Amino acid sequence: MTDVLREVFDEDLDAIEIGAAILGTGGGGNPYIGKLRCREELKKGRKIPVIPLSELPDDALVVSLGGIGAPVVGVEKIEEGQECLRALHALEKELDVKVDALISAEIGGANSMEPMLTAAQAGLPVVDGDGMGRAFPEMQMCTWSIYGHREAPGAMADEKGNIVVIRETPNDVWLERIARSVVVAMGAAAGLATQPMKGDFVKRAAVPNTITQALNLGRAVLNAHATNADPVQTVINQERGKLLMTAKITDLQRHLKGGFAVGHINLDGFGKFNGETGRIDLQNEFLVFWHNGNVEVCTPDLIVVLDSDTGLPITTEMLRYGQRVAVLGLPAHPLMRSPEALTVVGPAAFGYTDITFNPMEDKL
Amino acid sequence: MKSIKTINRSDMTDIALGGAFLGTGGGGDPYIGRLMAEQAIDNYGPVQVRDVEALSDDALIIPVCMMGAPTVMLEKLPRGDEAINALRSLEAVLGRKADALFCIEAGGLNSTIPIAVAATAGLPIVDGDGMGRAFPELQMVSMTMFDIHACPMAMADEKGNALVLNTVDNLSTEKFARVITVEMGGAGLIALYPMTGAEAKKSILRGSLSLISNIGQIITYEQSANRNPADKLASELNGVRLFEGRITDVERRTEGGFARGQATIQGLEAYKGRSMKLNFQNEFLLAEDDKGKPLAMTPDLICLLDLETGQPITTETMGYGYRVIVFGLPCDPKWRSKHGLELVGPKYFGYEADYKPIEEIY
């Protein structure tokens, strides 16, 4: 473990990229482009200061921001780099306020990098924490919303210079619905900044220290590569996770539906799982894992698919027939397992009304 | 043509009728807007109509209107305060109150909605509009030809959603507003094209409220004299009777937030033995004879009237068996410029035909 994280440097970015991609549970988009953008900013002499959650002043104004859209599109339509900055400025103008710090809505995937990138561009610090401790496909699925923060107004910006400010909505689900239709018109990728939060709320609601978590996780994987240790086991040890299956992908169905990547993969076990079958459903992220026909791990616990040799995460848009993978389960943060959280991010929220969430530790 | 100075409750019937006529089949049925305007005038008093020249160059003029598919508007009625919410939203963004309201589209529902808002807000309304008829998309206004930006634009719906758009051009505004409208349930209220008095003086089409009021009066008068208003309208408005017949087929679909389709009409009386097709996208855009030769096309106006009563018929209400007169009118000369035809000519809507003014076809 490192000391308290105060600043993100160039040499940390590769590790954060790996850690964030693992925590993305297949979704949240690829952090690679965001990493390169961050690196460019650091080369220009800009900095990415980090505030530990515990040191955040109670009255600080914190804005949660990130990219919104379909991860498969993010691979082809590369962000221009200032989408989130423009969204932040539009929000500041709408509310006539100055923001004190930024925070990631989701540490998993590309949105680990976006607040760091915008922080460097805007000269603001980024808070060590996030609103999910993983990735989820919809905006109201973050702790801000779950624990009572209203997301409106929200500002969206695309790479062309279009800006849409959603000033009022009856609830956060409507904000999500409207933002989702706007993002499709924006070409399925855009930056989004939502209503600032007070520091004392962020301290209560944020999943803590997740930049540090992603950094340490990525460092452990890189270290395993360097020392020829088993990277899959390293991830399991680092995150107190469980190996669910080693398997080959025998079927892959994935399509774009309403701005989401939706589908499933079928798995045939190998190694000590020889003869066993698995299935994973996805909606941008991996949501449910069935082992021999029974639900073994489901949202909000994390289902992670790693390349079985390198231990590097495979995102839903990179899945291919025939890939040999290790499927891991990682426990979600307690903030994501509370009854109020489960109504928003539990299996029923994704249409699995017949599946009841049980913490993965209970079953395994 | 008499110009209208004040809109009282009693004027609303004629305005709605004239608005339906200039709607060229689209823009929604002005009836709901008429009821809203009558109610607002009852509650807040009549609406003053201003000639644009009477406004100072730095006056702030804001058009308000409804956006969406007319087929939806028939079933999803406004709650009532959405348009005011959109107006207030836009004023908040601009940091300034509107001095006058404006009707973006003289045809259809949007001929009457701004009057309801003007009465409620206690603001005058400018005698003019941005189309001289109805068109399906929001960049299709004369202001676009004068580089006036649709943004900032405010949108509101009956559920309490409110948005502000700032886009790179007016076509993008349309694209964004359209998907948001679909998400709002197919219809929303909007305030957009905030402009100064000086900008309005050079860009708007003038006298439109007076025109629709006069058209309404002609239709009412001719109906009361048991005459079909088509002849009088033709002589007063320089229009052409294109066809008479019975609707034998209507193919209609709501797609991408629009009511799109085609109607087939079999000729009656002098037109017996012939048929024609009417293509529409919210509005009637192209009339063709049975050999596919254009009879009239956008931006010229194609209006459908009931053969007996002369009552305007909208695309969403027309049905099999209706006996109709197809009526053509020349559009405002501004639309016949190169820029105008790029915005609203037949090619923009995906029709092959090269634009030919209706006077040259007949």
Image (cartoon, coloured by chain):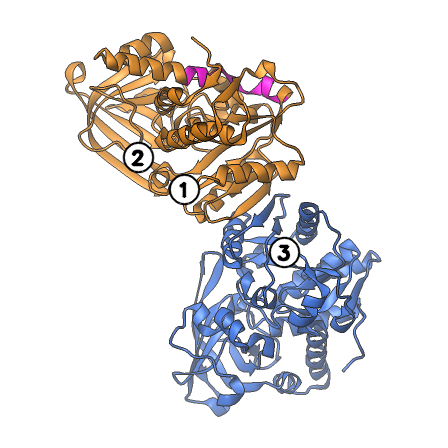
Chain colours: A blue, B orange
- Which residue type carries mark 3? Thr
Chain at tag 3: A
Q: Which numbered mark, 1 or 2, is in the foreground of this view?
A: 2
Asked if residue A87 is positioned above or below residue B171 in the image, the reply reads below
As drawn, the residue found furthest toward the bottom would be: A272
Magenta part of the protein: which range? Answer: B199-212
Quarter-wise, where is residue B59 in the image?
top right
Which class describes the residues within 10 Å of circle 2: few (<14), some (14-19), or many (20+)?
Answer: many
Provide the residue designation for mark 3.
A194
**Mark 1 and mark 2 residues within 8 Å of each other at the beta carbon:** no
Give the total of numbered labels. 3
Q: Is residue B37 left or right of residue A331?
A: left
Q: CA distance from mark 3 to mark 2?
A: 40 Å
Q: Is residue A292 left or right of residue A173?
A: left
Q: Mark 1 is on which residue type?
A: Gly
Measuring from the top left, give residue B302's x and y in whole percent. 34, 22
Type of amino acid at the residue the image marks with label 2: Glu
| N-term-proximal mark, 1 vs 2 | 1
Packing grade of label 3 (10 A; few <14, some 14-19, many >=20) is many
Q: Chain of mark 1?
A: B
Residue B343 screen position, x and y as percent: 49, 27
Q: CA distance from mark 1 to mark 2?
A: 13 Å
The reply to whether the C-beta atoms of the residues labelled 3 and 2 are less than 8 Å apart is no
Magenta highlight on residue B214: no
Q: Chain of mark 2?
A: B
Q: Residue furthest right?
A: A45
- The residue tagged 2 is B316
Could you tell me if residue B178 is visible in this image?
yes
The residue at 50%/58% (across/down) is A173
Principal SS element in the magenta part?
Answer: helix
Residue occupied by mark 1 = B257
